[in-house]
């Protein structure tokens, strides 16, 4: 056995030791703490049941009260050779799971996770039964469930276009008041175009052509609606009219798996038409979107015009798709860029800028980068990709692992967690990492006989030879006669591509250097002879006559409103040229991004890290700072100590248990007096720090914006200890830990540190941290930009104000109502087209 596979197996074994210990099943933690719920909440060690937890919006549409994680993980168990556990899991699904729930779910998520999970489980069950040792009792029960679910999804396709509604009620369909859905008009391209693998497999397994026919019809409609000059598709489409609602085009969120399923539909079904369509799209992607190593969104009607200056993490699947296509060089380049961003931030941020800074700080443990790493290792055999896989494993273990599983990162900059472990973590991340390190003898079957769906479920390639109705073939238009020039009939031999073993390394080194130096954004495209570059939003000054003249040439005018605000309006027809009009659109977009970025570049939240046994730094809570006391951002060590509950808990009078609070970090409840007054009382009692816990039950940093704890209007220089604020949900995690383990040690810092043993460091006191008179800048969660609506009479809290210099203020003023004007311009542009 190789060192790498040994390392992986040790990791899997350690992951599966949950609080009851001894369980060897990969899903032991889920079954112990969450089953039959849809997902595990790894911080609070319980299951997430929709309707019982605070709503997370569209994210919850994946939950249908059908034991999502268990179904999504079925074929992973077989891949890991856990056949006994697989058989038990299948029996649980058959006995416990109901699909007729009165609940509205996402058609896309239910298709790829639940229908795909049932079909992958069925494929594995059939394979094991044919092996003669396991699953001898199996009579296609999972397939019957899959057909039942497929029939429940079919009403969503009852539209004039054939594109499905984005949501469906599992019991009532999409029409009628009892369905609580069916009123939507838009869906994403990936949502409508990521159906064909599961629906075609269901048709060919059952012999019922209706499913594949509906999936093909949706793909045909998307193909017909592509922009004919650029051969690109937009991100969001009207399911009734076929009009593009969002006309930006890329390979990330909203479009990603549409391209993936065109190529994989050819691989699974053998229909050349899918390959032709994919190759036409791919040529346009490489012409307009690919700017190696970057992949940047463009406008479908004007593909030389960038749509944004940041990338989302979902595009990390694309190098793996390029491997399947056989285009290895750009796959190596983009993967290397993603790897360097990962090493810079420990995980891929949900979005990052073209100079590799954090744009959206979350990371829900997405598997796409691991997927591409696996496919590149299979294509090249380069051990460099084993090193990349090791980095993923190390970071998961160091930063995401908590006592009840793995927790999503709420903020990659601070290391704070979210009480979330999506089903795709076990369905995809574990599968691709295991395959990356596995030797052939470690696998119970040949994965080359299967195609991976976008959720990494395994569908047998033998389905391409399964008899199916001629009625379900795609509609081939006259212009779509097969053209050999659009085909790469065979994938290139990687040994011939890379005769020099150093060649891949030579591709990677310039990219590594670029990320290390935070390379600048690429200059916008300009036609030859069009003069100097246009005015950039970051350079604009409203009192500069030259800048105002440049705006006029771009068709942008300033309107001074009665309330003192300044409004930007752009009319393309008033620009001096078509290029100037495009510059004006770009300027308006940059103004929006600049304002958003200024808000996001405020100081991130603080971190409270539980470092004592059995947590060892694995649990990190998002906390808000105070405007007084120790500035933790000036400390390399933070403040570390055991926590103790102050008496009185409000901290609004002299502390009566001072002998217990001395040398500890005091826990206090919000309310009844000012924050600064609480800090003075615990400081007098000898505390080295304080944590104020919200008394509003159910409050959470997941749903409410963080804020700074303000002073009491008096000089607060006398407060020399750090004070942090936790919402009720995060505070309850800390209180429950204290209740169970009695002695709980925490680290207060600006961001999470590597996990450490409680005895490995000396406790830092407040005096070691730096000047207590430094003020902390305003802070707000990156994704939570709305202002809170309530304010306590007894407590003054100050909302973040951002930068106050004149240039920042002018940007904010100029952004007033600009979205309406941009939409109006887009409508005008559409009318012109």
Image (tube, rainbow, N blue to C red):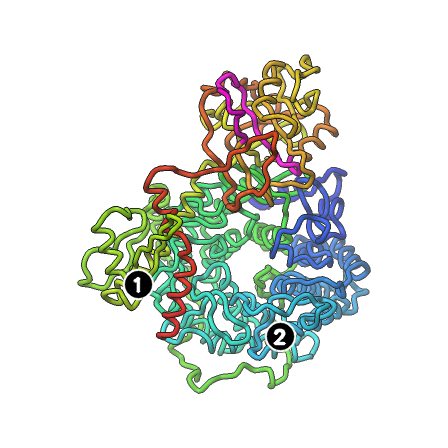
How many C-alpha atoms fall within 10 Å of the one at disc 2: few (<14), some, or many (≥20)? many
- CA–CA distance in space, label 1 to label 2: 38 Å
Q: Earlier in the sequence, mark 1 or mark 2?
A: 2
Q: Which residues are magenta?
A: 709-731
The residue sitting at the front extreme is 562
* Residue at which label 1 appears: 582
Q: Nearer the viewer, residue 720 or 510?
A: 720
On the rendered structure, is 84 left or right of 258? right
Residue 728 among those drawn in magenta: yes
* Residue at which label 2 appears: 157
Residue 755 image offset from top left, x and y in percent: 57, 31
Indicate the secondary structure of the residue bearing disc 1. Answer: helix
- The residue located at (68%, 57%) in the rendering is 63
On the rendered structure, is 689 left or right of 582? right
Residue 140 image offset from top left, x and y in percent: 76, 69
On the rendered structure, is 335 left or right of 684? left
Depth-wise, is mark 1 or mark 2 nearer the camera? 1
């Amino acid at each position: 056995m190789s060192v790498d596979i040994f390392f992986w197996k040790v990791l899997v074994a350690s992951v599966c030791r949950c609080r009851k210990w001894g369980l060897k099943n990969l899903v032991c933690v889920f079954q112990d703490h969450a089953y039959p719920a849809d997902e595990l909440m790894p911080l609070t060690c319980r299951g997430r049941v929709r309707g019982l937890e605070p709503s997370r919006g569209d994210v919850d549409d994946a939950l249908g009260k059908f034991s999502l994680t268990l179904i999504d993980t079925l074929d992973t168990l077989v891949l890991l050779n856990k056949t006994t556990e697989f058989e038990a899991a299948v029996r649980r699904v058959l006995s416990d799971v109901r699909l007729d729930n009165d609940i509205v779910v996402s058609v896309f998520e239910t298709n790829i996770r639940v229908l795909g999970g049932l079909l992958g489980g069925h494929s594995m069950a059939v394979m094991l039964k044919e092996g003669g040792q396991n699953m001898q009792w199996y009579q296609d029960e999972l397939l019957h469930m899959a057909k039942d679910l497929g029939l429940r999804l079919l009403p969503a396709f009852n539209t004039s276009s054939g594109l499905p509604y984005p949501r469906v009620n599992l019991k009532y369909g999409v029409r009628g008041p009892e369905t609580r859905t069916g009123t939507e008009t838009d869906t994403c391209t990936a949502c409508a175009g990521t159906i064909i693998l599961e629906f075609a497999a269901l048709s060919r397994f059952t012999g019922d052509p209706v499913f594949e026919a509906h999936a093909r019809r949706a793909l045909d409609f998307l193909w017909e609606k592509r922009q004919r000059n650029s051969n690109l598709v937009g991100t969001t489409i009207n399911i009734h009219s076929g009009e593009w609602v969002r006309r930006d085009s890329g390979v990330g969120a909203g479009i990603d798996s549409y391209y993936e399923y065109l190529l994989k539909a050819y691989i699974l079904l053998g229909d050349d038409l899918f390959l032709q369509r994919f190759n036409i799209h791919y040529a346009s992607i490489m012409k307009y979107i690919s700017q190696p190593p970057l992949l940047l969104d463009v406008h479908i009607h004007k593909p030389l015009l960038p749509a944004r200056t940041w990338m989302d993490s979902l595009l990390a699947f694309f190098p793996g798709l390029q491997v399947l296509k056989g285009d290895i060089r750009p796959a190596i380049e983009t993967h290397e860029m993603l790897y360097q961003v990962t090493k810079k931030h420990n995980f891929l941020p949900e979005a990052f800028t073209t100079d590799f800074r954090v744009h959206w700080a979350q990371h829900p443990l997405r598997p796409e980068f691991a997927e591409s790493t696996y496919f590149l290792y299979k294509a090249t055999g380069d051990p460099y990709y084993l090193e990349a896989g090791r980095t993923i494993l190390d970071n998961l273990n160091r930063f995401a692992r908590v006592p009840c599983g793995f927790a999503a990162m709420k903020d990659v900059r601070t290391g704070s967690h979210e009480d979330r472990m999506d089903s795709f973590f076990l369905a995809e991340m574990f599968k691709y990492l295991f395959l990356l390190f596995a030797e052939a003898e470690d696998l119970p079957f040949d994965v080359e006989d299967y195609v991976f769906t976008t959720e990494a479920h395994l569908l047998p390639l033998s389905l391409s030879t399964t008899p199916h109705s001629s009625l379900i073939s795609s509609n081939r238009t006259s212009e779509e006669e097969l053209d050999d020039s659009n085909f790469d009939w065979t994938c290139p031999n990687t040994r011939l591509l890379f005769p020099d073993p150093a060649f891949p390394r030579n591709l990677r080194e310039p990219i590594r250097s670029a990320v290390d130096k935070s390379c600048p954004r690429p200059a916008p495209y300009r036609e030859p002879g069009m003069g100097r570059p246009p005015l950039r939003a970051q350079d604009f000054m409203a009192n500069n006559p030259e800048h105002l003249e440049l705006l006029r040439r771009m068709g942008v005018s300033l309107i001074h409103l009665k309330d003192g605000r300044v409004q930007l309006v752009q009319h393309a027809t008033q620009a001096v040229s078509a290029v100037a009009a495009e510059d004006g659109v770009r300027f308006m977009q940059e103004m929006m991004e600049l304002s958003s970025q200024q808000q996001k570049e405020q100081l991130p939240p603080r971190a409270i890290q539980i470092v004592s046994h059995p947590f060892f730094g694995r649990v990190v809570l998002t906390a808000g700072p105070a405007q007084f006391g120790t500035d933790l951002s000036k400390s390399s060590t933070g403040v570390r100590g055991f926590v103790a509950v102050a008496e009185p808990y409000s901290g609004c009078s002299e502390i009566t248990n001072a002998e217990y609070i001395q040398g500890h970090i005091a826990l206090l409840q919000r309310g009844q007096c000012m924050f600064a007054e609480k800090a003075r009382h615990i400081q007098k009692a000898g505390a080295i720090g304080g944590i104020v816990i919200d008394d509003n039950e159910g409050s959470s940093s997941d749903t409410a914006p963080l804020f700074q704890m303000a002073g009491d209007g008096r000089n607060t220089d006398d407060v020399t200890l750090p004070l942090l604020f936790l919402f009720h949900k995060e505070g309850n995690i800390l209180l429950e830990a204290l209740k169970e383990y009695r002695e709980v040690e925490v680290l207060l810092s600006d961001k999470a540190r590597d996990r450490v043993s409680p005895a490995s460091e000396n406790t830092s006191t407040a005096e070691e941290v730096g000047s207590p008179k430094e003020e902390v800048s305003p802070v707000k969660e990156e994704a939570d930009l709305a202002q809170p609506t309530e304010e306590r009479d007894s407590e003054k809290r100050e909302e973040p104000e951002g930068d106050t210099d004149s240039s920042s203020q002018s940007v904010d003023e100029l952004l007033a109502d600009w979205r309406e004007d941009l939409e109006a311009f887009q409508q005008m542009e559409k009318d012109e087209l």
